[in-house]
Amino acid sequence: MPNGLIDLWNPETFDDGLLAELRCEAGMIRDYFATERANYDAYCAPGNRDMLRENPHWHIYNVFVDKVLAPLMAARTVRGWHYTRMTDAEVELLRRVGVYPSNLETIRRRLDSLAAAGEITSETADVLFAESPFHRDEMGGRGDKFWTTSQPVPVTRSDVTSLLGSWGGESIYWRIQDPELVASIGRIGRPRVLEIALPLDAGPDARDAARAVTRTFAAGLGCRVTRERLDLHVVRPLGPEAVVAVHTEGDEIYERIGRDYPIVFAEEGD
């Protein structure tokens, strides 16, 4: 793992500068999350008819996140997890040139490369390109971005099995209905999980990352918090140095992701 790479869920990866700011406001952070929990428990209590109470620490907490932590996080790099299906040739290219945001241009290029390699016909490439939801922005502005998740999840989880089972990601398979076409893109490549070093100045997620590290720190103070899994993205290409690891189905680590890798990671409940 590159020096300075932060896991939003692991306080042991927080650098000294980040920890110094968090420790300086430890009392406020503890009070904020303790009050949040108390208010929520009271709201959910049997027979309660009152509205959810306001948290008197809300303003100072948000000022701290927005004005102190978010700028700090914008200068840092976090680890993201990208679930996908790729050919060996695409993995080699990834290691050589890095990652890039997905858009119609990159989709066309990937499809043409598959056709040139004999993985699909040029006619199939044309059909897949024409069916991409990016033509109609059907995915809520997910184009021109490279997406990851902030926490590893097991490869058997239903929210990633489609990504691992169909080549090309949601930008390709989202609208495909033809069974033969679905089967064909499910035979291309192999399931992969990428560990990506995401510089937060390459996207808009610094504030969300700041909130995440605060929650992680609060858990270390004994507060009852729910660890949030964030969707993190960048809007510019990242060089090959951003590719921390590529885990492929059949590798030793692949099946352990989100279970006991990395470290002893397991998803937490409330």
Image: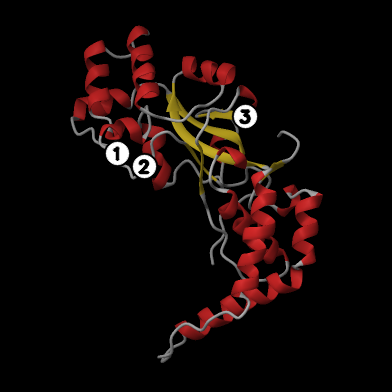
The residue pinned by badge 3 equals 242
Q: Quadrant of residue 194?
A: top right
Helix, strand or loop at disc 3? helix
Q: Nearer the viewer, mark 3 or mark 1?
A: 1
Is residue 98 found left or right of 217 in the rendered image?
left
User: What's under tag 2, amino acid-wise?
Assistant: Gly
Helix, strand or loop at disc 2? loop
103 above or below 51?
A: above
Identify the residue shown where x is 64% and y is 53%: 70
The residue pinned by badge 2 equals 141
- Residue 137 circle label: 1
Q: Quadrant of the C terminus?
A: bottom right
- Residue 183: where, in percent of width, then height? 26, 27
Is disc 2 surrounded by few (<14), some (14 to 19) or many (20+) residues within 10 Å?
few
Identify the residue shown where x is 40% and y is 91%: 49
CB atoms of marks 3 and 1 within 8 Å: no
Viewer-nearest residue: 255 or 123:
123
Q: How is the image coloured?
A: secondary structure
